Image (cartoon, rainbow, N blue to C red):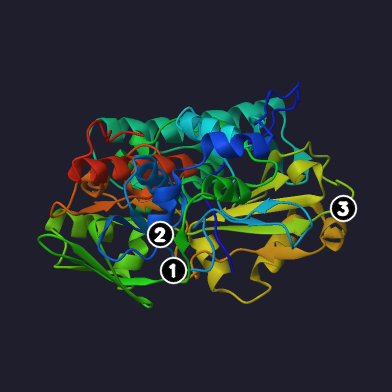
Amino acid sequence: MVPPDPFRSPADGAFEARRVLRGLTRRALLAGAFALPAFARALGQGTAGPVDVIIIGAGAAGIAAARKVAAAGRTYALIEASKRIGGRVLTDTASFGLPLDLGASRLYLPGASSLAELARQSGGELDLAPSGARLYTGAREATDTQYEDFAATVRRVERAIGAAGDAGRDLPAARVLPPDLGAFGAAASFFVGPLRCAKDLDQVSTVDFSRAEDREEALLAPNGFGPLLAQLASALTVRMDTAATSVDIGSRIVEVRTNRGTVTGRTVVVAVPPSLMLAGKLRILPMLPTRQRAAVERITLGAREKVAFLLPGNPLRAADDETIIVQAGTQRPLVLKARVGGSDLHVAEVGGPQAQALSDGGSNAGADYVKAALIADFGTDIGKRMGKVVQTRWSKEPWTLGGISCALPGSGNMRRAFTEVVANRLIFAGEHTHETLWGTLAGAWASGERAAGQALRLLGVQGASLAP
């Protein structure tokens, strides 16, 4: 059905006054001040000759790249295979009558500070996400000692993986864990592995993990990140339902073949997940250099899915937008984002093999999984209260084929290959290309701005920056 991204947020018992970062709301006033050049928009579609930059994929990275190219006064063609923009940013407002982010649902700071500012300038509204989480062991909230043990175990797991990565030991993260993690070992490993990296720790590179920027502080978008991204793209021309099938890099121009004809340009930004290239849906001609081919094969997308459901009456006594972690026996923890936006809507976040199983399962796979977990933890009554359920299937979505990227063991340095210009014409963008903000909306956006800067430099634009 639809897609996901990063994790973490919530509250820590004391729900003090939340710092709220509000955006400007006078959109009419802002429209003139922040609109992109009209001539760049007009040339963005249907020019007679090659455009300056072809951008494949209108997700966050592609939108960021197109904005920067247009702001420099150069021509572009932004093409998108699906019938919508946003990629793994998707807000569903129909299922529950309120905004539900099925994909990216957090904007992590400080890496996203520039995107947050752009969002506010365009009239977006952002709230600081609650910090911490509430822990249950079975049907009971954890004691103070159990809270301390769980937090300490998570830190031990993170430190062990980070230390190996910092030392350049690029190993499966599971191999460097301390031998005795105690009662919360399985929960901590799930928390750090499948939930954060979308893979079990034996499939996670210690080096890749160690380079990830801090993701403690984050912003929420009360109206959803989909509308926010759409507002940032509102001045752009996008060729929808235009699937690129191949990129042919010539000595002077690039030809991108699509289901709607061929687009030619002087440079190309490929802002789609590596899973599409690995599956043969997008071919690069001639063959990519060895470094980039290896990166496509080793920086793979893990599985991240969400199961959203109504739970009236607040039986968990949760605060608004609180994270709840439930550990019961030997089963994998249930991680919930509770009372989304202060409503009866809850979202279970699932990663790794379990998320893949839900994606591969039948129409009721998500509902059955969550109901069984809730009943096992809290009894049959809470299962009876569950209402409507909506499940994502990002691993089955044809233009994504996965959740978020995480380097396989031994491949922690390979993201760098995605930041290099290929044949003086081709540049990659997307969360998978960011060495420290991989798996995040902020990383995708920053990569698009970086890629646009590289393209503009190739085109001879003076002062074009490679950095966002």
Earlier in the chain: of badge 3 and badge 2, it is 2
Q: Any mark on residue 312, and which?
A: 3
Q: Nearer the viewer, mark 1 or mark 3?
A: 1
**Label 1 is placed on what type of residue?**
Ala
Q: Give the distance between the C-alpha atoms of the residues marked 1 and 2, in whole angstroms.
A: 7 Å
Give the quadrant of the C terminus.
Answer: top left
Query: Is residue 272 rendered to the left or right of residue 141?
Result: left
Residue shown at the point (49%, 33%) measured from the top left: 215
Q: Where is residue 274 in the image (x, y as percent from the top left)?
A: 33, 60
Q: What amino acid type is highlighted by mark number 2?
A: Gly
Mark 3 neighbour class, 10 Å CA radius: few under 14, some 14 to 19, many 20 or more: some
Where residue 325 sits: x, y (%)? 66, 43
Query: Is 371 situated left or right of 433 in this image?
Result: right
Q: Which residue is drawn at 37% across and 78% down?
A: 259
Identify the residue under disc 1: 81
Q: What element carries label 2?
A: loop
Q: Mark 2 points at which residue?
A: 57
- Mark 1 or mark 2: which comes first in sequence? 2
Instruction: Using the image as rendered, state which of residue 137 and residue 305 is in the foreground.
Output: 305
- In the rendered image, which quarter contains the N terminus? bottom right
The amino acid pointed to by label 3 is: Pro
Label 3 vs label 2: CA separation? 39 Å
- Mark 1 and mark 3 lie on one chain; the one further toward the N terminus is 1
Q: Is mark 3 on a helix, strand or loop?
A: loop
| Disc 1 + disc 3, Cβ < 8 Å | no
* Front of the two marks 3 and 2: 2
